[in-house]
Each structure stands twice: as C-alpha cells, then as structure tokens.
Image (tube, grey):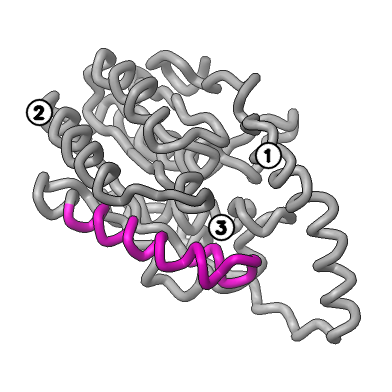
Amino acid sequence: MRWRSYVAVGDSFSEGMDDPYPDGTYRGWADLVATRLAAEAGPDFGYANLAIRGKLFGHVVDDQVPVALEMKPDLISFAAGGNDALRPGLDIAAIARRLDTAVAEMRAGGADVVLFRYANVMARLPGNRWVTPKVVQMNTVVGEAAQKHGAILVDLYSDDTFLNPLLWGPDRLHLSPAGHRRVAAQVLTALGVGCDEEWLLVPPHPEPTPWLSARTADLRWAGKHLAPWVKRRLTGRSSGDTVTAKRPTLSPLTD
C-alpha cells in the first residue's frame, strides 16, 4: 500500500456533515476513505481529520495546513472555499495565490494531495445565479493548482448525479450518507484503490413534488436552516465557533 497515513483538512464537507454515526458524531467520506486505506495498509495506518464546519479558506490554510504538515502524512486531502463562495466579496485572485502556495508546501513535504472541484450544490438553493459563478471560478482555480503541482483532482462538478436531491441532507447544503459514499468512491477511484460498489449506487430520483407541497417544504427549510445561517452571518458567528477537530492527531482508526 502506498499510503500509511492520511490527514483531511477543510470544512464541513470533510468533517462529514450530515452523515452521522449512531452516537450522533459525523463520519463522512474522509472517514470512509481512511477505513478503506487502513484495510490495505494494516493496523499501523494513521488518520487525522482536522476539518471543522463553517471554516473559511483562510482559516483552513492558516490553522489546519501547518498542523497537517507537521504530521508528515503520506496523503492529504484539501477542500476549502465553499463557505467563501457563499459570502460577498470573494477575492478569487487571492484564493488562487494562497491555494498555489499551500499545495506547493504540501507537495514539497512529500505528501500526495487530493483536491476537489465542488459539486453543483446551488442547483436547489436560493442565490443560485449569484453563487454558482463563484463556484465555477473556484473550481477553475482548483483545477489549475492540481495540474501545476501534480495533485489528484476529484471532479464532483462534472458528476450530474449530485443533482439528485437524495444525495443531500435536510439542509440542502451538506451531503447525505449516500452523497458521502459517492464522494468516498470517487476519491478511492482517483487513488487507484478499490471500493464498495454499493457506494456508487444512487437512490432513484424522487418524483416531482406538487407545487404547493414543494413551496410548503421550502418555507419549512427556510425557517429551520436558512434563517439561522443568515443570523450567524449578521452577527459574525460561525457554526464551527465551538467545534474542535474530531481527530486532531494521527492515530489508528481503532482509537
């Protein structure tokens, strides 16, 4: 096995929301990837997950990447910038420069690096016309960094399967368990590692919802998920303010 240690850095996407373990903590695609790699590498395989929900690109680069580099892992996955795209004033040129530097540092440390082109999460969310162009810009920057530095690129944006609402959780922003399994399968495929074929199975696309029922569901969603998000933005708070990394150090998955 090529990799004996793996560190995930990023935001809620890599933390694993909304794919809960029975105890309510989050699993997600990164845990699934780590489990598969550990099965190949053996009991000494080390895994750390530094990702924290709500973190902006700069937080990930400044706070998580240096910690990951200190661990000297064989493999690092980096996914950040989605939260920046949801906010006004995105400086894509600054993100491009910082991403270039961060990926160069991770590669110089000897790690293989996995980068992501984000799936089209905005297809079912308000603000689609405003946010989607920024996601496209972000994906372009990520693709360029991957090509320049020899990183492994996982292109979720080109996978139309993610237009299926059943791959997304109740908040319509985070992946469902089925969505996380599909991401894990794509990561492992990009790494040249086999995975459970069931992870690529997609639930049947739901039947169209009657207009009135759909609008009622939209109102419930806005009250439960959109309104709290807006309130946090207005008050300068983040969903990750009191959250710490779920696996802050490299350790076997049995820990």
Q: Closer to us: mark 2 or mark 1?
A: 1
Question: What residue is disc 2 on?
Answer: 108
Question: What residue is disc 3 on?
Answer: 179
Q: Amino acid at mark 3?
A: Gly
- The secondary element bearing badge 3 is classed as helix
188 with respect to 254 (left or right): left
CA–CA distance between discs 2 and 1? 40 Å
Residue 185 in which image quadrant = bottom left
Q: Amino acid at mark 2?
A: Ala
Question: What residue is disc 1 on?
Answer: 234
Packing grade of label 2 (10 A; few <14, some 14-19, many >=20) is few
Q: Quadrant of the N terminus?
A: top left
Given residues 139 and 45, the one toward you in this image is 139
What residue sits 20% from the left and 41% below the top? 97
Residue span colored magenta = 120-144
Q: Closer to us: mark 2 or mark 3?
A: 2
- The secondary element bearing badge 2 is classed as helix
In the rendered image, residue 201, in percent from the top left (x then y), is placed at 54, 67
